[in-house]
Image (spheres, rainbow, N blue to C red):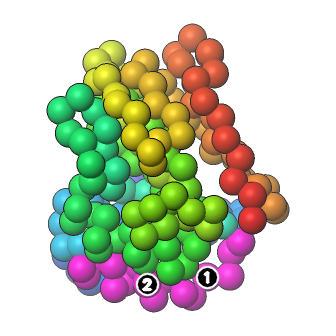
């Protein structure tokens, strides 16, 4: 992190450069650390999201709240119980993660259930050569276990995501409109 200048608007000194927010075009992006002091981050996140007038709110952190790989299944309960309700409250459109080695996009989720007004969670941890097999659940819209990257494009009325392999094959794409 010493090579980059990160925003310093975290809730307290111990979280500086671990959680922060920035505005970019129509997006208000919040970055958090899913490993450390979740309650303090959730309190800050609630205030931060309430203060923005940007049409699109996106969240980024490491561990995805919903996991479906061959070893872990179900939720990352700490993240799901502490951070996800704040995203629901402020109608965050998209939440990006990289903690598990596969591509996964959920259906929109609110309060742990599929809902048209929910958050779309995208895990994009499969950039390396080793990925894990995934299992289908009722929350999953798409899952792949190939090395990949994700492109996010935001406009006035939509956010588009597109997952591609390193060979430029499209694995998945979606549009969130509000």
Q: Residue at x 23, y 28 (%)?
A: 70
Q: Is residue 10 above or below residue 71?
A: below
Residue 54 in magenta stretch: yes
**Magenta-colored span:** 39-55
- Residue 176 coordinates in the image, percent (x, y): 69, 53
Which residue is depicted at the point 31% across and 23% down?
Answer: 133
**Main secondary structure of the magenta stretch:** helix
The answer to whether residue 94 is magenta is no
Report whether residue 151 is seen.
yes
Task: Determine the secondary structure under disc 2.
Answer: helix
Labelled disc at residue 52? 1
Q: Give the quarter of the image for residue 42.
A: bottom left
Q: Position of residue 154 (x, y in %)?
A: 72, 53
Instruction: Give coordinates of residue 132: x percent, y percent.
Output: 29, 24
Q: Is residue 77 above or below residue 21?
A: above
Near-viewer residue (13 or 109): 109
* Closer to the camera in the image, 32 or 146: 146
Q: Is residue 85 above or below residue 59?
A: below
Q: Where is mark 2, residue-wise?
A: 46
At 63% from the left and 62% from the top, the residue drawn is: 116
């Amino acid at each position: 992190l010493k090579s980059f200048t990160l925003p310093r608007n975290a809730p307290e000194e111990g979280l500086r450069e671990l959680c922060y927010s920035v505005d970019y075009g129509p997006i208000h992006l919040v970055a958090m650390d899913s490993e450390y002091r979740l309650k303090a981050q959730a309190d800050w996140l609630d205030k931060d999201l309430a203060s923005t007038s940007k049409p699109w709110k996106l969240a980024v952190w490491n561990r995805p709240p919903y996991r479906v790989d061959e070893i872990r299944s179900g939720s990352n309960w700490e993240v799901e119980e502490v951070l996800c309700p704040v995203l629901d409250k402020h109608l965050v459109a998209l939440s990006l993660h990289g903690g598990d080695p596969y591509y996964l996009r959920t259906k929109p989720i609110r309060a742990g259930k599929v809902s048209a007004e929910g958050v779309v969670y995208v895990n994009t941890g499969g950039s390396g050569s080793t990925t894990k097999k995934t299992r289908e659940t009722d929350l999953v819209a798409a899952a792949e276990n190939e090395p990949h990257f994700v492109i996010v494009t935001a406009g006035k009325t939509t956010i588009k995501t597109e997952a591609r392999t390193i060979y430029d094959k499209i694995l998945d794409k979606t549009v969130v409109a509000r």
